[in-house]
Image (cartoon, rainbow, N blue to C red):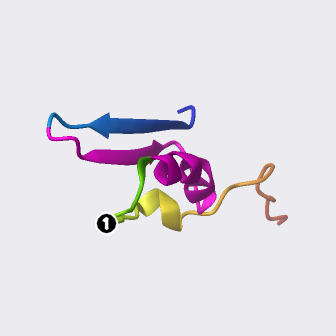
């Protein structure tokens, strides 16, 4: 899945910013400019993906 940021605006004017396809805290850095532009944050909910670490390169294989 390609990383993306979804911004929702309800008819009442409430907004939400949701990241998808990010692993680890990189989602916060990606969504920060949008959150700053939308104003004060009333709540934050971290997804399981936030607690994941980004995988860099291929995992090492155990030698037997």
| Residue found 70% across the figure and 55% down from its top | 55
Residue range of the region highlighted in magenta in the rendering: 12-37
* Secondary element type, mark 1: loop
Does the magenta segment cover residue 26? yes
Which of 27/12 is in front?
12
User: Would you place residue 54 above or below residue 43 in this image?
Assistant: above
> Which quadrant of the view contains residue 63?
bottom right
Q: Position of residue 56 (x, y in %)?
A: 77, 53
User: Would you place residue 19 above or below residue 53 in this image?
Assistant: above
User: Would you place residue 23 above or below residue 13 in this image?
Assistant: below
| Residue found 15% across the figure and 34% down from its top | 11
Does the magenta segment cover residue 45? no
Which of 28/10 is in front?
10
Q: Residues within 10 Å of mark 1 (few under 14, many from 20)?
A: few
Q: Position of residue 42 (x, y in %)?
A: 30, 65
> Which quadrant of the view contains residue 15?
top left
Which of 19/59 is in front?
19
Q: Is residue 38 left or right of residue 1?
A: left
Q: Position of residue 36 (x, y in %)?
A: 51, 54
Taking the view exactly as shown, the residue that stands out farthest to the right is 63
Q: Position of residue 40 (x, y in %)?
A: 39, 61
Q: Is residue 7 left or right of residue 36?
A: left
| Residue found 27% across the figure and 36% down from its top | 9
Picture mark count: 1
| Residue found 59% across the figure and 62% down from its top | 25
Residue wearing tag 1: 43
User: Would you place residue 53 above or below residue 22 in this image?
Assistant: below
Q: In which quadrant is the C terminus drawn?
A: bottom right
Q: Is residue 55 left or right of residue 45?
A: right
């Amino acid at each position: 899945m390609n990383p993306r940021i979804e911004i929702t605006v309800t008819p009442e004017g409430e907004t939400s910013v949701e990241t998808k396809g990010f692993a680890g805290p990189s989602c916060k850095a990606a969504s920060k400019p949008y959150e700053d532009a939308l104003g004060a944050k009333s709540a934050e909910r971290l997804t399981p993906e936030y607690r994941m670490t980004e995988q860099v390169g291929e995992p090492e294989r155990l030698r037997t």
